[in-house]
């Protein structure tokens, strides 16, 4: 966030007092790049404090590394081969997929079977879309329309899942078994602690109940 703030200030200063030459254009592109990757990193760190915190932290590091690589390509004027830009599109697609997956994984503590299985299916579709995209990036000998059609179908299904699963989680909220079986204050405290840790109430108290 600090890097984006600095880049934003430089971008505004360039637009106000600078001439729109090559350097100014690179400053503006850098600002846009850092801003875009910062959004991806924010999506990933949303998992911090939850059960899948490590996944989110790794995703944030991927976003930071991808941003650094992209900014490097913006400012260095060498003549690169195709592999350099293939890596660029690879890390970009990985960051996008990881960011969306992190947002969906905020629902990983839901206990409704339809939500849990829908989440798993959607994440599997994300992986499938990412693999097809990487195939298209790195392999150029696909002169038929099968691969683009496959990508389109998978992308539509993945988008559908990314919309339907959160809606289902809202329409079918979990009902904590602790509520009603315990004094109100105790039940609320258990639910709050389970939400803070990103687990269910059953998972929270399971170590205590083991013989």
Image: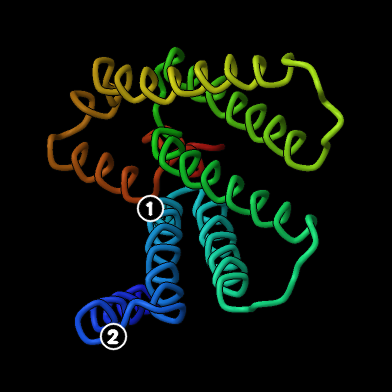
Q: Is residue 144 left or right of residue 69?
A: right
Q: Position of residue 50 (x, y in %)?
A: 43, 50
Look at 63% across and 78% down and name the residue there. Answer: 76
Q: Image quadrant of residue 4?
A: bottom left
For residue 164, above or below residue 41 = above
Q: Which residue is mark 1?
A: 46
Q: Answer with left or right where residue 18 lies relative to residue 56.
A: left
Q: Quadrant of the N terminus?
A: bottom left
Residue for point 51% across, 43% down: 207
| Residue at the extreme bottom of the image, as rendered | 17
Q: Secondary structure at mark 1?
A: loop
Q: What kind of element bears circle 2?
A: loop
- Residue named by callout 2: 18
- Choose the circle earlier in sequence order: 1 or 2: 2
65, above or below 195, in the image? below
Residue 151 in the image, given as x and y percentages of width and height: 63, 22
Most foreground residue, 42 or 22:
22
Give how far across and how far down residue 72 sits, in percent: 60, 75
The image shows a total of numbered marks equal to: 2
**Which of the pair 110/83 is nearer the observer?**
83
Q: Are marks 1 and 2 in contact (CB under 8 Å)?
A: no
Q: CA distance from mark 1 to mark 2?
A: 37 Å
Mark nearer the viewer, 1 or 2: 2
- Colouring: rainbow
Q: Residues within 10 Å of mark 1 (few under 14, many from 20)?
A: some
Q: Residue at x 25, y 22 (%)?
A: 170
Tag shown at residue 85: none
In the rendered image, which quarter contains the C terminus? Answer: top right
Residue at x 68%, y 49% (from the top left corner): 90
Where is residue 13? Give x, y as percent: 24, 83
Please state which of residues 19 and 106 is positioned toward the viewer in this rendering: 19
């Amino acid at each position: 966030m600090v890097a984006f703030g600095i880049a934003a200030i430089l971008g505004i200063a360039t637009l106000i007092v600078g001439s729109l030459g090559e350097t100014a254009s690179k400053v503006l592109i850098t600002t846009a790049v850092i801003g875009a990757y910062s959004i991806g990193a924010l999506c990933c760190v949303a998992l911090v404090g939850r059960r899948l915190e490590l996944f989110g932290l790794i995703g944030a590091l991927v976003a930071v590394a991808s941003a650094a690589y992209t900014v490097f390509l913006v400012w260095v004027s060498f003549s690169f081969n195709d592999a350099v830009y293939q890596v660029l599109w690879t890390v970009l697609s990985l960051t996008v997929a990881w960011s969306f997956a992190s947002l969906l994984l905020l629902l990983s503590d839901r206990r409704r079977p339809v939500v849990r299985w829908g989440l798993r299916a959607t994440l599997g579709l994300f992986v499938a879309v990412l693999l097809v995209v990487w195939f298209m990036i790195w392999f150029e000998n696909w002169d038929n329309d099968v691969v683009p059609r496959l990508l389109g179908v998978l992308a539509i299904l993945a988008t559908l899942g990314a919309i339907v699963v959160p809606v289902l989680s809202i329409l079918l909220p979990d009902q904590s078994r602790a509520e009603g079986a315990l004094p109100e204050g105790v039940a609320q405290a258990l639910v709050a602690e389970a939400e803070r840790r990103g687990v269910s109430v059953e998972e929270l108290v399971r170590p205590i109940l083991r013989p």
